Amino acid sequence: MKTSTGVTVFSVCLFAAACVAAPPVNPGGPGHLPPPAPAGFDNASNGLTDDATHQVDQGQFDEFEEISDGLGPLYNAQSCRECHQNPEIPINGGAEVIKGRSLVNQRAIGPNAAFPTTDIQERVPDSENIRTFRISVNLLGDGFVEAVDDSTLIELSKKQCKETHGRICGLALYVPVVESPGTTRIGRFGWKDQHASLLSFSGDAYLNEMGITNALFPDEVTNLCNTVSEPNNKPEADGLADIDHFTRFVRATKAPARDARQAATPAARQGEALFARIGCEICHVPTLVTAAAGTVVNGGKFAIPEALGNKSFHPYSDYLLHDVGTGDGIAIAMEEHYGKKMYQIKWKNLSLENHHSSANKLRTAPLWGVRTHAMLMHDGASLTFREAILRHRGEASDVTRHFEQLSQADQQAIVEFLKSL
C-alpha cells in the first residue's frame, strides 16, 4: 500500500473488491461465446510467448533495482513484484518543490554517503487535506483487458445509462497512449483508468514506483541525489528495455482462475444468481470478449496476437469509472502519468473536462481473483466482502439497498459466490 495526496498509486499482484456490474458482452450473441482465455495460477504463459521467454520476462519483472541502476531518487519499491505484491511537495527542507504530483513516495535514496546533507524524502504537506491510500491492482490476465476494443467499453457505458435511466453511467475516459504521442484510447488500467496501454502503464510505474527513468518517461521527478544518466534503463542486447519485458510478461499471464470447488457449492451458485438479480452485474460485468487477432491498437504500436484475440474472459468489471460514494476528490495528475511534455502534444479525443470530472470516480474493481486478497476496495479499508458491499453508495445506492433487503442467508450466499472468484 502507498500513500497518495492527489490521485492514484498503482502497482502489482494484489486485488480489490466491491459489489456492484450486465450480461456477457458478446458480439456473437447468446450461445456464441468465443474460446475462453486460459486461466490459472501456474506461472505458465497464456500462449503469447513460450514458457522459457515468459520466465525470462518474469525474471526482469521480479528483479531488484539498485541505485547504480537508477533507482530513485524517489521510489516506493525496488521491483515490480514488491508492490503487486496535484499538490506541491517540498523536499530537502523546501529547497526544491515538486509540482503537479499526486503520489507521495514512501522511500528515497538520500541522504546517503554521496549526499549526506540532502534529505529528499517526500512527506504530505500540511496544505494538502485530501489524502488517501491505494492498494495495488491485479495484473494477471491484463493482456486480455488490453485487447478489448474501445467500442465494447463505450457500448457498456451507453447500455448502463439507458437501462438504469441515468442512475448508473460509467465514464469511458480517453487517455493518452504515451508510446504513440497524439493517440488516445479508452482507459482501463489503474484505479483511475489512467492508462489503456500496458506499455504506458509499465513505463509510468517504473518511474513513479521505482524512480527508474525510461524511454517513455525520461525525466526524473527530482535531480537531487541523482547520479545515473537518463534514461536510467535502456534496451539491452536483445533490443528490449525492462519496460518491454514487463509488458510482454503481463500480456502473457493467464487470467485468474476461479475456485472450481467453491463455485460448485449450492450456496455459491445461489449467490451468483442473486448477484445478477440485485444488479451487481450492471458494473461487475461477468464476461468480456477481446477484439479479433490482428486488430491494431495503441496507435499502431500493438497488433493483438492469436493468443489474445477473440477470447472470452471473466473479469467481473466494466473497466469504467463510477462514483460509488468512495471517491476522494483526487483527479488524474496529468504530467505524473503522461510525462512532463504531455501538454505540448495535441491528443485526439482527450477531454481535460472529463479527466477533472472523474475526481470522485474510481474504476470498477475487477473481481477475478478477489478471494486471494484480504484488503478490499481502492483504499484497502474494507476487510470483509460484506463491508465492501455496504460501502457502495452513489451510483450503486439502489444495488446496495437491494442487498440490504435480502435475508441473512441470501446475503451470505453472495459472499460465498465472491469467495469462488
Image (cartoon, grey):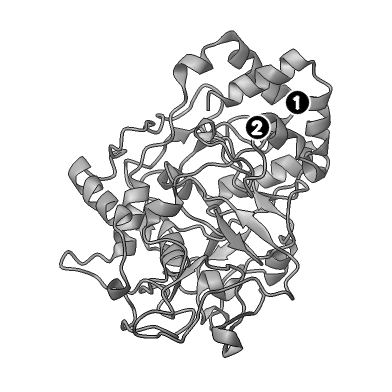
Q: Indicate the position of residue 265 as horizontal and vertical percent values.
A: 55, 11
Residue 384: mark in rendering? 2
The structure residue drawn at horizontal position 38% and vertical position 79%, both measured from the top left corner, is 112
User: Residue 216 appears in which quarter of the rendering?
Assistant: bottom left
Residue indicated by mark 1: 278
Q: In the image shown, does 195 or 417 lie closer to the viewer?
A: 417
Q: CA distance from mark 2 to mark 1?
A: 19 Å
Residue type at numbered disc 2? Thr
Q: In the image shown, does 111 or 100 lie closer to the viewer?
A: 111
Q: Indicate the position of residue 1 as horizontal and vertical percent values.
A: 54, 53
Q: Indicate the position of residue 70 as horizontal and vertical percent values.
A: 33, 74
Q: In the image shown, does 321 or 325 lie closer to the viewer?
A: 325
The structure residue drawn at horizontal position 29% and vertical position 72%, both measured from the top left corner, is 69
User: Residue 235 appears in which quarter of the rendering?
Assistant: bottom left
Q: Indicate the position of residue 132 as horizontal and vertical percent values.
A: 67, 58
Counting residues from the start of the chain, the first of labels 2 and 1 encountered is 1
SS of the residue under disc 1: loop
Query: Is residue 200 something one can see in this rendering?
Result: no
Direction left: furthest residue:
237
Q: Is residue 78 above or below residue 108?
A: above
